[in-house]
Amino acid sequence: MKAVVLAAGEGTRLRPLTRTRPKPMIPIGNQPLLEHVLEAAREAGIDEFVFVVGYKRERIQSYFGDGDDWDVDIEYAVQKTQLGTGHALLQAESQVEGEFIALNGDRIVEPSAISAVMNERQSTGESIIAVTRHAHPENYGVVDLKGRTVRSIEEKPPAYTVQTDYINAGVYGLHDSIFEDLRSAEAEGELGITTALRERRDGLRAVPFDGLWLDVSHLWDVLAVNGRMLDRLDPSDSSTAAVHERATVVEQTSLGSDVRIRPGATVLPGTSLGDNVEIGSNTVVANAVVLPDARIGDGAVVRDCIVGENASIGPNATVEGGETNVVVDSDVYEQVRLGGVVGDNGSLGGGVTLSPGTVLGNQTTVESGCHVSGRIEHDAVVRRG
Amino acid sequence: MCGIIGYVGREDALPILRDGLSNLEYRGYDSAGVALGGGTLDVYKKEGKLSALTEILPERSTATMGIGHTRWSTHGEPTDVNAHPHTNESGDVAVVHNGIIENYATLRDELEARGHEFTSDTDTEVVPHLVEEELEPERDLVDVVSSVVDRLEGNYALGVVVAGRDGIVATRRGNPLVLGFADHGTFLASDVPAFVEHTRRVSYPEEGDVIHITEDGATVYVDGEEVSRAVQEVDWDAEAAEKGGYEHYMLKEIHEQPTALRQAISGRVDEMKGEVELEIDLPKEYLNSLEEVQFIACGTSYHAGLYAAKLFEEHADVRTSVEVASEYEFDGGRDPWRTLVVAVTQSGETADTLSALKRAKRAGARTLAVTNTLGSTVTRLVDDTVFIRAGPEIGVAATKTFCSQVATLTLVAVHVGRQRGTMSTADAQELLSDVRGLPGAVQQVLDNEEQVRLAAEEYADGDAFFFIGRGLGAPVALEGALKLKEISYDHAEGFPAGELKHGPLALVTSETPVLAILTEGARASETLNNVKEVESRGAPVLGAASETVDAEKFVDEVFRVSEVGELEPLVANVYFQLFSYHVANLKGRAIDKPRNLAKSVTVE
């Protein structure tokens, strides 16, 4: 069976990371979310993929190419404007025939969930949707079930109306007849897959599963999910990483190729260091996601922090880490663990300190000795006042 | 400049040859043809792209043996009759050929005097007639081809089939040929992508080998004696040659540059010690005795050589010269023992570069190749090779290989400088740290693609385009102009910025956009004066500038380059690649296969 993977979305809540890459390319354990999806599907026996791409698609195409490195075939379909999952799926119409699987490209899901959907599709011939329990169903598509039959799917309903904790896990077993339904349901504005599925006459069956299902909605989820995945993944440090004999790198970390770790540095659990990252002497890096080509200067302390691609953190800079309240689009999120975010190509001078929860945009420069907090836009320069 | 393929096996040859030719189309594409073998030969050939040939091919054929060719004209116009395979009058002998037979005119006169009739204007056609003359019922085809090639002068890779004879006989001198061994049969081709879908087990024949290819394998002969040649596994994926969602290979390859650069430097750089680890054996005493490093190359590789030469002079404190390979002579009273000749060639098959290299070797100089292609001819000619590890490049316009060539040559410069004691650890650390910064700096350019695309829209209609830069920006100006003219067919020229006032300034008008390199390593403040000169004549100016250069006042469109010291001009070049691509794309050009050009130019 072919899998259509929806990977066209931007993920605005993950800015500044998603200013330069689509959400499926957010790295977890040094692999993009989309790669985790691809590997789960491959383990479930799928070796042909159609990636529906759109926003910043070059990042996806350059990383995955035609799929050779994974021993699968990848074709691409382009969704020019992001008008919902149903619209995205429609873009792949000419590339699939008969039965197929559709997957969200930005949710980590267990292979067993995918193979369960494939089996159920093949044995029943009905449209299938995987569902899983979630503590906050109101943030997702809430699925009301009668036995295994889906009665309704409601996107992000008000919390007080929710009677069930089953949510749409974003794995579908479908037939190409869905495209006709999608076209006739093509309403004004956004078109979700679930809109079309609701209309199907031949029934919609749910396959519940309990396994791993991880979503990355907010910046702090990147750190939490990264930590969880590092606990699960086998240590896979690149052979070209160079760790100085007087540096300490614990397990539950992931080192990309050509990472250099200088004398006296300590790399603690929950940390992923991307390709070509340099960690200076006597630094402490803990629970951090450091993207490729970034450099962390001598003596810096970087905790609970996301460091963007090609960013540089000056000597003795401090990201102290810890929990704090963060405001995103006027919603307050209480006690989330986020030491700070430095955007792509950002630069912190020597001795800079970041208060917990600080988010710096891409290409933002902070001059030596400044203390920064809050949210600072991209291309800004922070000087000592 | 041409691609050949042959197959003998148990599967239908037609689809195998057709797919193989399509994988070789990058080598040339003005005509193509196949000959299907067996008791009789069926020859199909057609002017134009491969799709034109596909239209005249039969739906299917039971032949399990055949040869094919995709051509880029040297002798004779691209027409149906000049397309390969070429045959004798009866059509019993068919030949595909890549290269040039220099004495073909003499041979042709002789053959015509003996009554042979020629139908094409090509040099190749002499071969089937010569084969016919030598052919006797009892005589082995290997023996026949061996005597024929004794009479040929020039460069060639040849594949010969004869009706009723088993297998294909192939031979090479100076042009690439590779054999492939699949479960269902045996291949010959100009390059691995032709058959990589079937096998990765290959062997590279030596110069002058005559090979009999059959269903079960290949037997190699040298002067009639059987010899064995090593079989190796290639790990390059021809499938990686597919476009992966991009509209053009060129754009795909531009976007692959951060990865290609990381591969180029991976495991080679120790910034802490300020040292470089390369797989070459250039003794310290030899490097200390050097008087000159000569770079020989063509096209884009030549520009990489110009860039590298400046770095060598500065850091390795050695005199350099950079020569266009087709103009190269080893002369001027140079001491061959104290001259290192560095050949820069992406494919490792560039005929001009190979022949220049042979001249250097004849003179007794030590040679080093900087190439992208494992097992290529250049690697067998030189004393040492450094690979740039950029992965396959299919677009005719070189992009990622330029970037990787310069990055790799920078590492070589540091190595030579350190060995000669002319570069301090601190200077080496700084330059190496800039090399480390390249992938990130290039990614930042790629993230700004939209800005470049909009600029291309605005300025695509210029009458001509001029690229200017100083210092390390001068070779980038040349490269920027080459890229634009190659793929957009616009008139584009690059100059050292100081040369503007000595002539080219006369060409500058309000309709000729000027692209300037205003970065570190390119003497930006001096170039800004030249920008003012063109700006006062109304020319629009686009500039790739360092963060620290205050360019906005005179430059209409500023592209920002992040800080990587002397490698900033190389990063600026990525903006120019994107600019050229988008200008050409707006004009609907055949970006991956520009007219009249081929990827690796294997004729002189």
Image: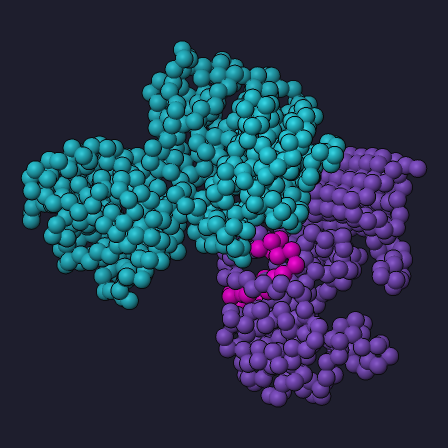
Chain colours: A purple, B cyan
Res. B375 visible in picture: no
Which residue is drawn at the image coordinates 60% and 88% (left, top)?
A202
Which residue is drawn at the image coordinates 76% and 57% (left, top)?
A14
Residue B107 lies, with reference to residue B53, above or below; the image says above
Q: Position of residue B452 (x, y in %)?
A: 63, 46
- Magenta span covers which residues? A39-61
Q: Position of residue B441 (x, y in %)?
A: 66, 40
Residue placed most toward the observer, B92 or A352 = B92
Residue B569 lies, with reference to residue A24, above or below; the image says above
Residue B506's quadrant in the figure?
top right
Residue A363's quadrant in the figure?
top right
Where is the C terminus of chain B found, in terms of image quarters?
A: top left
Q: Position of residue A248 (x, y in %)?
A: 73, 41
Magenta stretch: residue A67 in it? Answer: no
Q: Position of residue B525 (x, y in %)?
A: 70, 26
Residue placed most toward the observer, B41 or B604 = B604
Residue B188 lies, with reference to residue B561, above or below; the image says below
Residue placed most toward the observer, B64 or B90 = B90
Residue A71 falls left or right of residue A346:
left
Which residue is drawn at the image coordinates 89% and 47% (left, top)?
A373
Residue A163's quadrant in the figure?
bottom right
Where is the N terminus of chain B found, in terms of image quarters?
A: top left
Residue A224 falls left or right of residue A123:
right
Magenta stretch: residue A54 in it? Answer: yes
